[in-house]
Structures are given as C-alpha cells and as structure tokens.
Image (tube, rainbow, N blue to C red):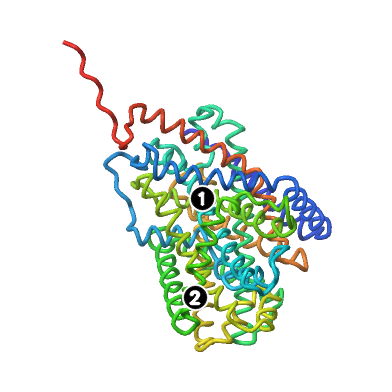
C-alpha cells in the first residue's frame, strides 16, 4: 500500500493560525502594535491597488458575462445542468457572501456617513443623506460580488470542466502548468487562501458575536461582557460545526434558505411599519447617485480630499471582500456546477447587489428618519445601533427578536460554509471533505475570533486589521486568476463562435 504523504498545506495553515492565536494571547501589546502598523502601511501605500483590483474585477465580469463569446460556456460537460434550484443556489451564495455584516452595518453604516460624511459635506444635510446611501450601495453592491465571481468562475471551470482539485492553486494550471502548481508555488497559494479565509471569516464571526450580545442585552438585559461573548462563540461553534458536518444538501442549504426567507420577511414588515414613502424615495435617489458616480467612486482613494475616511471605509471594505474571496469564491464554485458563465455572472453579481440596495434602503432610512440626537446615540455603538433605532418604531421589540434570530442564522451560514471550504482546502481539493477536517477548522475559526476579540480593548478594530493584512497578498493572486482563466477558455474552445457554439470544422476537399 502506498504511504500517504502528510498534507503540508493543512499542517502549515494550522500552525500559522495557532501562532497568531498564541501571539495574541501571550503578547497582546506587540500583536496590536504589529497589526496597527501593518494596516497603516497597507492602507497608506496600497489603497490604489485595492481600488484598481476591484474595478478590474467589475469590468471583467461585465465583459465575460454579457459580451464575450464564452458567456454560454457551462461549468461542466455541455449537457450538464445545475445541481440546485435557482432559489437554493441564490440563498446559499448570498448567505455565504454577505454574512452577518449585512445586519451589523445595515443601520450603522448609512448613519455614520450621514453624521460623519467626507470632508466638504455638511453633516446631517440632504447632501450627506445622498452620500450615505450611494456609498453604502458602493460598498455592498456589484464590486464585492464581482470580486467573488472572478475567483468562483475560474474555480468552477477548472473543477467541473477540467476535473481538477477544488484548490485555489488549480486556477493557475493554464497559466503556470501542472508541475509548478503541484510544487511549492501552488502550495504557497493554497496556504495563503486558507489563512485569508480564516482571517476574513473570523472578522465576520466577531461582528456577529458582538451584535448577538447586544441583542441579548436589548431583549433580556444580559450584560455585554467578554465572558458572555466567549460563551456565545463556543455555543454557536457547536451549531455551525454540526450543520457543516451534515453537508450542503441538508445542513447548509436548509439554514441558507431559512436565512433569506427571514431577511425578506423582516424587510417587508419594516417597509410597512416604517416610513414607507421615504424608503422608496431614498432607494430611487440613492441608486441614481450610486450609478451616476460609479466610475468616480470606483477609483476614489482620497488623493484629493479626506484620505483618512477612505482608509477607514472604502479601502477597508475592498480588503475585507478580497479576504473573503477564497472562501466565498470556493463555496460559490462548489454549488455552481452546470451553470453557464452568463447566468452565473447575472446570479452572482447582479441579484445579490440588488438585494443589498433594497436592504440598505430600508434599514438606512429607518436610521436616518429619526431625530438627530437619537441618530447620534445609535451611531455611538455600532453593535447596538440597529436595536436603538428599532425602539423608535411600531413593533420594534418583536422585530428585534426576529432580527436576533436572523443574526444567528447569518452567523451560522457564514461559518458552516467556511468550515466546509476549509475542509476542502485541507484535503487536497476534495468536493466532500471529511468531518474531521471540518471539525478542526470549525474549532480553529472560533478560537481565532475569540483571541482577536480578547487581545485588544477594541476587538472589532483588531478583527478589521486582521482582515486587511490577510487579504493583501491575495490581491495579486486574484488579478492573476483572470489571464489564467482566459488562457484555459481559449485552450478549451479554440473555435468558439460569438454565439457560444463551437464552429464546425470545414469539410475536407474531395
């Protein structure tokens, strides 16, 4: 029997994650200093790179999904069809891609932009309101989803069309060759993917725990303490690991479907009991401002204005989404077998962006429709902003209870999807990882989130910093994925016509 070699990607990634955890526990001061220094260096010197990369992702997705001759190419054999219904597919990709951050920032972000806008805009003014909605739409709109779609397309093509392992390194086989990808370069890419995934998801888990604790305090007067937050992480880890173990068809799909239904129900109720007409008006005008300024917003880094605002918001978001790309891209690829590139781009980039626009229109209007003093009170604590605002509206308490459930389901969906993907990475790209791998990574993610929160008085800031640092090297990997995918498509379809069908070979002369 052939002796099984140790999985170096798994071992190095686990060692790196444990090292970060131990550093945060043993020397929190030096850890905080190193993280702050890294963040300041990256956001000061490479803000341009993040904006450039995200803009490239958007342009590439629009071209390949709507105008290229490859838009009808399927992820899999030509006769393959999607494994999951459109609703199940959308529910899973949306829940995994946005996570609890959508609830966490739904009220808090537009409020922040309204009260503390960029330099040159009067706080609390109509211009500040337009700025608030258009920037929230930018940060949660087509850019993050194009970022996910680029990597997911390349992965799905290599997995289902070429039969390669579900590893980020597989994306580069057309560009680098199989020998290099199987060597140290490919292993390095896969280790970076694992670490970026752990860092990005730990950020979301930390945000979720903070808001769940805030919800418990609002509803049941349970104190907001580190001990309570640690207990919450442990309890939720048990649930998300259990649902990851049950697999995609049962555990993950079920929770994702429940998640989206709750979110739709909450929005519908709030549109009725909230300021209905202002919600619709803000959505229309905010969307118009977003689309009108899309090009300028996409390339803005604060070079001519308030650079600190961009470093704290837009650049952080681009880094956050890039940090999530290996996990979310891998998960979206895993559930997209049989879909064409065109329908994939429409489903991954446009539908979730549209959902986010509606979400921020509803929750942002709730926050901006109260008096200024209440708004300032709400924005003072991001984790409690949503519950503070809901107090001001009819059915505020029952809606808060439902929101609390939604936060939990978002938390669980993001975490169980990430646990599944990390298991795939750890077992050389298998599409069905073992329960052992999923359990190990489920525990490690919970530990990483807990340590990041305990290592500093400003736990949320530390989690943001970790996300930015983890994302940076992956920016180059994702940019390189585009020419690699194009080379793979050209090799696979040398005679593809503009309609997406292979041109028939010319008949030989008699």
Q: Which residue is mark 1?
A: 148
Tag of residue 279 = 2
Residue with the most extreme left position:
510
Residues packed near mark 1 inside 10 Å, few (<14), some (14 to 19) or many (20 plus): many
Q: Is residue 314 above or below residue 111?
A: above
111 to 175, vertically: above or below: below
Residue 386 drawn at (x, y percent): 59, 77
Quadrant where the C terminus sits is top left
Mark seen at residue 283? none
Question: Is 88 situated above or below 223?
Answer: above
- Give the SS element for disc 1: helix
Q: How many marks?
A: 2
Q: Which callout, 2 or 1, points at the residue further toward the start of the chain?
A: 1
- Please tell me how crowded label 2 is: few (under 14), some (14-19), or many (20+) other residues with Cα within 10 Å: many
How far across and how far down the image is residue 346, in percent?
Answer: 40, 52
Q: Quadrant of residue 452?
A: bottom right
Left or right of 32: which side holds 112?
left
Left or right, 376 with reference to 327:
right
- Residue drawn at (58%, 65%), measured in percent from left and top? 101
């Amino acid at each position: 029997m052939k002796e099984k070699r140790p999985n170096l990607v798994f071992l190095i990634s686990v060692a790196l994650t444990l090292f970060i955890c131990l550093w945060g526990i043993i020397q929190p001061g030096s850890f905080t200093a190193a993280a702050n220094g890294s963040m300041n260096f990256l956001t000061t010197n490479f803000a341009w790179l993040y904006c450039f990369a995200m803009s490239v992702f958007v342009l590439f997705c629009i071209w390949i999904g709507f105008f290229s001759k490859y838009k009808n190419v399927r992820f899999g054999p030509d006769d393959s069809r999607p494994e999951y219904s459109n609703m199940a597919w959308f529910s899973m990709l949306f829940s995994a891609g946005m996570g609890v951050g959508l609830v966490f920032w739904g009220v808090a972000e537009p409020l922040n932009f309204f009260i503390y806008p960029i330099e040159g805009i009067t706080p609390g003014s109509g211009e500040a309101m337009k700025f608030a909605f258009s920037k929230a739409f930018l940060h949660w709109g087509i850019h993050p989803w194009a970022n996910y779609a680029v990597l997911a397309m390349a992965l799905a093509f290599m997995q289902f069309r070429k039969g390669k392992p579900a590893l980020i390194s597989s994306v580069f086989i057309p560009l680098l060759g199989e020998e290099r990808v199987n060597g140290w370069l490919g292993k390095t890419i896969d280790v970076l993917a694992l670490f970026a995934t752990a860092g990005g998801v730990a950020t979301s888990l930390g945000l979720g725990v903070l808001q769940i604790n805030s919800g418990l305090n609002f509803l049941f007067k349970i104190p907001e303490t580190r001990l309570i937050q640690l207990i919450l992480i442990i309890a939720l880890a048990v649930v998300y690991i259990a649902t990851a173990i049950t697999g995609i068809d049962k555990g993950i799909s079920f929770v994702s479907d429940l998640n989206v239904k709750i979110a739709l129900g909450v929005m519908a109720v709030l549109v009725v009991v909230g300021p209905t007409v202002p919600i619709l008006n803000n959505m229309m005008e905010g969307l118009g401002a977003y689309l009108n300024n899309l090009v300028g917003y996409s390339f803005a880094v604060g070079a001519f204005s308030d650079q600190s605002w961009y470093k704290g918001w837009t650049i952080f978001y681009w880094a956050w989404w890039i940090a999530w790309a290996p996990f979310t891209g891998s998960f979206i690829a895993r559930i997209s077998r049989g879909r064409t590139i065109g329908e994939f781009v429409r489903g991954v980039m446009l539908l979730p962006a549209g959902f986010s626009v509606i979400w921020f229109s509803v929750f942002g209007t709730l926050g901006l429709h109260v008096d200024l003093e209440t708004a300032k009170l709400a924005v003072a604590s991001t984790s409690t902003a949503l519950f503070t605002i809901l107090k001001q509206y009819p059915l505020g308490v029952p809606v808060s209870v439902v929101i609390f459930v939604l936060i939990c389901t978002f938390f669980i969906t993001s975490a169980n999807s990430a646990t599944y993907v990390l298991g795939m990475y750890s077992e050389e790209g298998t599409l069905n990882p073992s329960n052992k791998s999923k359990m190990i990574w489920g525990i490690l993610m919970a530990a990483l989130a807990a340590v990041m929160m305990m290592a500093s008085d400003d736990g949320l800031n530390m989690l943001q910093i970790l996300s930015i640092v983890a994302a940076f090297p992956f920016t180059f990997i994702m940019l390189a994925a585009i020419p690699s995918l194009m080379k793979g498509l050209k090799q696979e379809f040398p005679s593809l016509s503009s309609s997406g069908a292979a041109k028939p070979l010319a008949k030989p002369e008699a």
